[in-house]
Amino acid sequence: MAQGNLDSNGDITCPTSIVGESSSANVNAGLDRLRINSADENDDDGAVQITCFSDLSDDLTLHFQIIRLHKQIYAWIGCNSAKFGHLYAAAPTRPNNMVNVTSLLGGASDNTGSGIARRIVLKTGLNVVLACNIPKDSPMLEAAAEKKLVSKLIDLGYTKSKI
Amino acid sequence: MDASSAPFPVRHKKLSLDIQVIATQIGSMGTTLHARKEEGVSIHPTFSVSVIFGKRDEPVLVACARQLIEHISNCGSSRPLVLSLGLKDHSVGTLKGVVTAVIANRLW
């Protein structure tokens, strides 16, 4: 999914480009947004859109990767590293619009990330697979990450509009 | 299958990076598998591959993950692999195509 180059130290580096900066005086944010579409750009259902960006919050850097598939969203939240973290899957269930979430890798259904996955499903109505690397017992960090992720999802137009 | 060139936001070191691969023909992530090399004293490494989400009765998917984790291990990396396969057909040819494509875009 991601490509990079090996430098002399054996580290993998990936170029990022800054396309805009938040005007907030309290937060320095580097935003990197890239959209990759299939050949038929008029057909949004067939396009795979990938968005990557980072955000600096309280001396910690949060990294985000959002992949929009047809009727599904994959999101990864990293905290200061590129570790995969715990993996959760959440989906709306019929007939009443309840949301079910389960842990696929690591963690349990009540750990960091499961609540985020659940609320993203409520906002988007799509199936969500979320990989989350936020440390445990950090509710403020989790809330900040979720807020940033949701605002980006709204910005990208993935959320349901409220009538 | 889409090959992405989106730049990843993190500059990461080799040892701390897990490997995640998504290959889809059907527009969704499909079946998710987890594969890892097991700690052991034997000369020959052993691997654990399991389906964590999706079809559990498709041996081709498990074989695909097994081939990839063995290749990763032979390259000297002991990182675990999370593989998502959303395939229209589960034939050996598709398996080979996926394995070839992933190895061609390797990061380890």
Image (cartoon, rainbow, N blue to C red):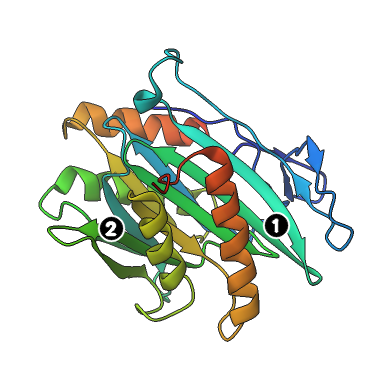
Depth check: B61 or A70 in front? A70
In the rendered image, the residue lying farthest to the right is A25
Quickly name the residue at label 1.
B13
Identify which residue is drawn at 34% across, 47% down.
B84
Residue B55 in the image: x percent, y percent?
Answer: 16, 51
Residue B36 in the image: x percent, y percent?
Answer: 39, 63
What kind of residue is marked 2? Ala
> Mark 1 or mark 2, which is nearer to you?
2
Q: Establish if B47 lies above or below A138.
A: above
Q: In the rendered image, is residue B43 in sight?
A: no
Q: Is residue A106 left or right of residue B108?
A: left
What kind of residue is marked 1? Lys
Q: Is residue A47 left or right of residue B86?
A: right
Q: Residues within 10 Å of mark 2 (few under 14, many from 20)?
A: many
Residue B73 in the image: x percent, y percent?
Answer: 47, 54
Labelled pair 1, 2 in contact (Cβ < 8 Å): no
Depth check: A98 or A108 in front? A98
Q: Establish if A32 lies above or below A93.
A: above
Quickly name the residue at label 2.
A91
Subunit of label 2: A
What separation in Å lies between label 1 and label 2 (alpha carbons)?
A: 33 Å
Q: Give the quadrant of residue A63.
A: bottom right
Q: Establish if B65 lies above or below A92.
A: above
Which secondary structure, mark 2?
strand
Subunit of label 1: B
Depth check: A94 or A9 in front? A94
Q: In the rendered image, is residue A112 in sight?
A: yes
Q: Is residue A91 left or right of residue B74?
A: left
Q: Are marks 1 and 2 on the same chain?
A: no
Identify which residue is drawn at 26% across, 32% down.
B26
